[in-house]
Every structure is written in structure tokens, then in C-alpha cells.
Amino acid sequence: MDSSNEARHSAAHYFLEGLNEIGFDYLFCNFGTDHAPLIEAMAAFKHADRPAPLTILCPHENTAVHMAAGYAIATGRGQGVMVHVDAGTANSAMALHNLCRARIPVLLMAGKAPFTTRGELLGTRDTYVHFVQEPFDQASVVRPYTKWEYNLPSGVIAKEALRRAHTVMQSDPRGPVYLTFPRETLTELWSEGQIRSYPAERFGPVAAGAADAASIDAIATKLLAAERPLLISSYAGRNHATVPLLDELARFAGIRVVEFNPLYVNLPHDSPCHGGFMPAKALAEADVGLHVDVPWIPSDMPDNPLTWWAHIDVDAEKRNFPMWTFPGNLRLPGDSHLILADLLAALKAKADSGFKARAAERVKRLAEEGKARREQAAKAAAAPGAVGQINPHYLCAALAKALKPSDIVLNEAIRNGPVVAQQLPRTEPGTLVGLAGGGLGFSGGMALGLKLAMPERTIVQIVGDGTFYFSNPQSTLAVSGHYKLPVLTVVLDNSGWAAVKEATLRVYPDGEAKAGDAFGATLAPDMNFAMVAQAAGAHGELVSDPAAVEDAIARCLDAVRDGRSAVLHAKVTKL
Ligand SMILES: Cc1ncc(C[n+]2csc(CCOP(=O)(O)OP(=O)(O)O)c2C)c(N)n1
Ligand SMILES: [Mg+2]
């Protein structure tokens, strides 16, 4: 192909065009020497007023990846994260673990050390780190958490590689993908005619579908005869339209719905069919059940061996869970919204008046149980606690009073997570975000990504004291101030890692650790998280006295609504 008369540009230039073509709004960046060609191309694009994704500079990779995740759950569209070679990839790995488990798409991109050492090509090694930042298998750092990985062999296919990355990350079940590029590859020059485009209309992702009519019929038949049907969900509500659908299905068929470790609002928490967050008792009784992901903990919530289970899941195979043995008499991989809609239609077509009466009776009973649960929660919140030991129930109930139904709560409160769930009922789809993975420190970056996508919403991140450290607060607060993304962070400081102490007690209830009160779980007692916020120009308050809680919450929310992040450091009941 003779293209000598055409304009020639760097591969980095085409790479940026490729990022536009895959529809990225943002790149969450933590740059290094590997990005010089991209930074140069970005500056040239800016100078020429050419469109390119906006860059958000994140002082820590944990912020960058989780911010992309927050943006993705708000918009349904994965974004790009740029990090520095193996080192930045390593710093991103924990966040990638979280996104992998939550099935949130992201394209993580990192340079590779230049491959030339003596100036053979533009971009050659020119600093010490280029010799030491080259592991044998860079992608292995994040391989357990990615659906796809690729090293760009030539700039001529930059757009093709980006389209492939995008198609894989957006295909169901969605998840992280990883792309690397050596510096010399990005400095290559190519003429415009040599570069092909891969438009979305022709190269789009794979979407999960519905189930076959016979399977739907089988579940409907079981439900029609069920006396104690149970549905357990954690992430059906990622599709906001599924929330009212599930409510309608549950009310129609008298199904108890339990949200175990909810990642989203799956059923409005005030629905009469909401069965709380602990399936233990319902599990023992259920005759027909539907579930997803980690529906219960078998060691302390044994399931009934007689229950007939349907497993409806976008990720029914659990290919990247080495061990996953929850029962499923019928497993339906697919889009749970489509499947539940068909199931409701099948039930409506088959239901007779006897079924409707039995279902209505169950809904009535479930509503009474719900009322009793709410009364119990109110009782738990009534005692304010003492100075230095605020009752977390009391604090969360006060926060609930101050929030609007549309405000979004990120629950990363760990051992106080159930308190948040109990005291801060969410009724609107999309107003709760939980932790799918096990890597603490997701909610700071996620909160910023949600705020970026939905500037009109109030975002509240609730964390434990240990988790506040994990979320790299200096980095998230810096991004919040820099890009005007105010969020409220509530730190439930119980003086350390209750989860670690409780784990030891579960395994050794009467052991040496208990006898010596030596759980390795107490953190620095005098840390002042309010001052961390203040150092970043945010509003910070330390509250120890229960009587001061309500006003402190009001001042913090005022600050956030005025455009400044706020951190409320609350000294709650000690571990
Ligand atoms: C990145 C990471 N490191 C360590 C852990 C192990 N871990 C699980 S819970 C927990 C304690 C969290 O402390 P805090 O946020 O204060 O919550 P609490 O247990 O006190 O409720 C730790 C250290 C983890 N899950 N993720
Ligand atoms: Mg703690």
C-alpha cells in the first residue's frame, strides 16, 4: 500500500483516536515514563481542539480503577485506566480483583519497558527504571482478574486492539481487560490510510439473553406449587429496571426476597416481600428457591436438602471461582431481567385464584415480619451510646433521617455493614453500592466515579476506620478537590479491625488470643481523620459525643451540597 502522500502520525495519535471510537469519556490516569508518546499526542489533540477522552489524574491507582468502576456502574459503560508499567499494574491489582468479582468493565492500560537499549528507535530506554521495570510476565500481575490481555505488537493495529478490548470487557459477564504497549510501539509513525477503524455497530459486545420457554415453564410450575418460596439476590439490581420487576414478581407469587451481601438495591427495602439480609431461617424452610453468586455461608446457614433450586445468573458457570458448589436443580445462564420478566408472564398466565389467594396470604405474613424487623431496628437505634462509644445504629439512623431517597450510599462499613443495611433502608434503584470483592478500599474511588457521572446526586461513603486507610484517602480527597467532586465520607471508627478479631474468635472461641485480649486488631488510637480531610481543603469533623451527631451530620451534608467533600470521623462502640 503506497501511502507516501498521506499525513503520518504516531501510533499514540491513532491510539487516542481509537479511545474515542470505543466511546470513552474518561481516562483515569497515573502516568509514568511509559506514557510520554500518549502525553505528547494528548497535548497535540488539545492544541488542535480534537476530541479525546478527558483525563482525570489520580495520585493513587486504587482511586483510578475504582473511580472508573463507579462511573461504569452509573453509566453501564466501562472506561479506561492508564497506569505505569508493572509497578502501577501491581498497585491496581487489588482494585481489579474487586471489579472482576463485581463484573464491572474496565480497560486497564499500562506501558511496558522500552525494548531497545541503545537509541535504535524513538522511545528507547533512557533511564534506570527502564532496566528494572521489566518482569518476564507483566500481565501475570493481574491475570487472575482479567478476561482478556494483550500486548500491542504494532501501532498499526492500535484501533483494532482497542475495539477487541472494549468488546470483551462489555460482553456478559462483564469484567476487566488489560492492554500493554512498549514505548517504541507508541512512537511508530503510520500514515492515515494504513489505519483501519472498527465501529461499534459492527464489532459490538455479546449480551446475555433470555432462557428457553421449557425452563421458564419448569420454574413457574415449581413456584405455583410452592409454599415457602425464597429468592436470594445480590446483584440483580445492577439493572435498575429489574428492581420494580422483582418487586412485582415477589408480590405476585408471594416470594420472600433476601438480599445477601447486596451490591445494589435489588428490591426496594420497604417492599412487603423484603426478607432482610440474612437468609439463614428462610433457607432452612424454603421449598423452592432462586439464587445468585454467594447466596449464603454454608457453614453457619445450612440449606435445606429438599429445596428445589433455580439458579438464574449472568455468570452461572462461575468460571473464575475455583470452588463454587451452591445447588441448582436448574441453572439458567442469562440476563436475569429478561428471565424474570418471562417468569412473571408465565406465572400470570398459569395462576389460578387459589394460587393468588395463597400468594397474597404469604405477602401479608412477610409484611408483618418486615414490620417486626423495622421495629427491632428502631429499638437498636434508640440508645445513643456513650462519649467515645457512639452506638453505630444510632448514628446510622440519624444519617438516614438526613438523607433523601435518591442519595447514594456506599456500604463499606465491614462489621458495621449490617448496621448500615438495617438502619439506612434504600428504596430507589441504584442508591446502594456494596463490595463484591474482598479488597478493602473500594468505596472512596467508587464514590468519586459515581459523582463524576451523576453530579446532581449526593454520594455518601460509609467505611470502617481500617477501610478508610485502605481507600487511600489522601488520593481520593485530592481528586475530589481538584475535580470538584464533593462526597460525604463517614468513618465508623471502632478502634481497629473488628473483622480480624471476630474471625479469630470464630475459629478459637476460647483460645489464647481471647485470654490475652491479643487479637492484633487495634489501630493507632489518636489518629484524627477529620484533619486528613482538612489537609486536603475538605470539611472534617471528629465526633465522640452522641449528642453532637445530628448537628455534625447536618454540617457535613451542608459542606458537600456546597461543593466541598466532608469526612465525619465518628468514634463508635469499640471492637
Ligand atoms: C486490602 C485488604 N487488606 C486486608 C483485608 C483483611 N480485612 C478484612 S476486614 C478487615 C478489617 C477492616 O477494618 P475496618 O474497616 O475498621 O472494619 P471493622 O472490621 O472494624 O468493622 C481487614 C483488615 C482485606 N479484606 N482487604
Ligand atoms: Mg474498624
Image (cartoon, rainbow, N blue to C red):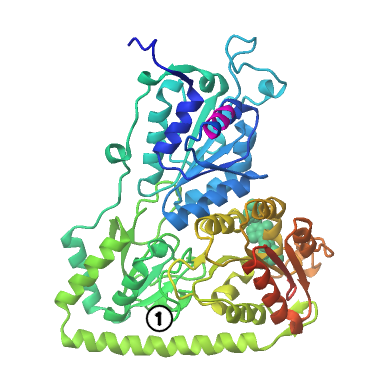
Bounds of the magenta segment: 40-46
Against 136, residue 232 (above or below) is below
Residue 100 on image: x %, y %: 48, 48
In this picture, residue 170 sits left or right of residue 342: right
Image quarter where ligand 1 lies: bottom right
Residue 462 on image: x %, y %: 62, 67
Residue 260 on image: x %, y %: 47, 68
Inspect the image, locate mark 1, and give the three-letter code of the amino acid beneath it: Ser
Quadrant of the image occupied by residue 265 = bottom left
Label 1: how many Cα within 10 Å (few below 14, some 14–19, many 20+): some
User: Which residue is depicted at the point 56% across and 51% down?
Assistant: 67
User: Which residue is depicted at the point 51% across and 86% down?
Assistant: 374
Residue receiving disc 1: 271
- Residue 311, visible in the rendered structure: yes
| Secondary structure of residue under mark 1 | loop
In this picture, residue 286 sits left or right of residue 533: left
